[in-house]
Image: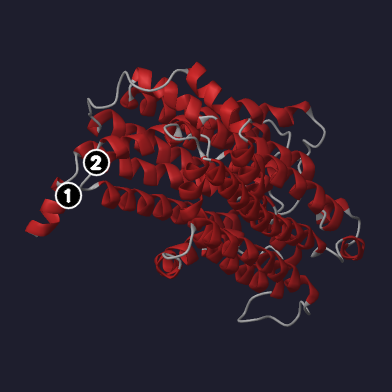
Amino acid sequence: MEKIKAFFNSYSKAFWVTNVVELFERAAYYGVFIVITLYLSRILGFNDVQAATIAGVFSGCLYLLPTFAGALADKIGFRNSMLLAFSLLTLGYLGLGLYPTWLQAAGLVNYSETTEFTGLTGSYLQYGIIPVMVLIVIGGAFIKSVISGTVTKETSAENRARGFSIFYAMVNIGAFSGKTVVDPLRKAMGNEGLIVLNYFSATMTLLALIAIWFFYKSSQNTGEGKSFKDIWNGLIKVCTNGRLITLIIIITGFWIVQQQLYATMPKYVLRLAGEGASPSWYANVNPLVVFLTVNLVASIMRNRTALTSMTFGMFIMPVSALCMAYGNTLNPGHHILGMHPVAFMMVVGIVFQGLAETFISPRFLEYFSLQAPKGEEGLYLGFSHLHSFLASIFGFGLSGWLLEKYCPEPTLFETHAQWEAASAHAHYIWYYFAAIAMVSAIGLIVYGKVVNYLDKKNSSRA
């Protein structure tokens, strides 16, 4: 008991409050994000391309804006920033639930049918959800910058590594919990479950807001940080640094495929494997694999360079995409371990995807920082997630086009036979992503050889 008490006392109260609210925030976000394209299409009537574009911009902004939000957070203080963020998030998630509820109460739509498109298709009322999503983007941008900053400031050199381990554990627990809530709601309530889910997320962020208001106190995080001008100049420097922008573009290929866990997978499995499929559960396989294998992979690759480890991971990604494609070529009547073959092979593909991530993600920041000019590593690392911004924009956009082309919405067809004919080659979607992953893997090998050649050439001149 004394050891447990000593462990908790080794960190400040602000540290523990921050970790708890991060768990709430991640549960709220991932619960909504795993079905965001389903929500936009089934609830608001957007077609596949429109839904993917909106979701991609939404996700992309959450990767691009935190560095800028962090500059403001440093000025107004972390506590005020978190109060603002969780207020906006609560209003945003509440709005995602209330807006379609109001539309249904007004008799404009009916969500009683599980897969029926709403009467909003082509209506300006669809776009009323955009301002609501902007609230979530702004709130989320503050949270991404402030939470990790708080963990840094509330730990010391002696306990920081363990502190971030606790933090990332909370992130994964929250993400897992949020996705877990989705499936029972959707299966019990059909499309209306996609609406009710937002009330769950609003509750989570409201609890976080209350926790910050009553329990978060810290005097270590005000009046510091860079100006917006400094950050903008940093973005320009990264984008004009040939080595870094090339690396970002190559790694974007990996994240484009990774983003299909949210962009393509939910609609793909529900359309091909049926409404009984559980895409939110399949998505949870990814963090589970990362949790189980990351330490083993780190041990295996500890004597290898970061670039070598990343290259291993890049070549696993095409295998992941091909596994996902394979399910649609099997006999749909022959279930595997009780699962539709599309669903089963999707899970197999996600296992490989999670394994690839353990080779790439932990080593990317290490390698990225080495490519930055000496003394400016911190400034450059602020934009190390530009690959996720690009992957969200292009990955979701490509997903919408591919779904519309190869695996369209069944309710758009008069008969099931017509839809079957239109979606006969649905697995071609994953061939596109396999090709992107393979080109990126080969590109990383070429990049490494060119960088090594230039380094040797510069070294011989010195």
Q: Is residue 70 above or below residue 244?
A: above
Image spot of residue 99 (x, y percent): 61, 32
Front one among 52 and 201: 52
Q: Which residue is drawn at 16% across and 53% down?
A: 7
Q: Quick one: label 2, few (<14), some, or many (20+) residues within 10 Å? A: some
Nearer to us of marks 2 and 1 is 2
Q: How many marks overall?
A: 2
Q: Mark 2 points at which residue?
A: 155
State the CA–CA distance, disc 2 to disc 1: 12 Å
Amino acid carrying mark 2 in the image: Thr
Secondary structure of the residue carrying tag 2 is loop
Left or right of 269 on screen, residue 82: left
Asked where in the image residue 342 lies, by quadrant, the reply is bottom right
Amino acid carrying mark 1 in the image: Phe
Q: Which residue is drawn at 48% across and 54% down?
A: 363
State which tag comes first along the sequence, 2 or 1. 1
Q: Quick one: label 1, few (<14), some, or many (20+) residues within 10 Å? A: few
Q: Can residue 104 be seen in this view?
A: yes
Image spot of residue 287 (x, y percent): 48, 60
Image spot of residue 26 (x, y percent): 45, 45
Image spot of residue 269 (x, y percent): 70, 63
Secondary structure of the residue carrying tag 1 is helix
Give me the disc on residue 126. none
Q: Which residue is drawn at 38% across and 25% down?
A: 81
Q: Mark 1 points at which residue?
A: 8
> What is the image's colouring?
secondary structure
Q: Residue at x 48, y 37 (%)?
A: 381
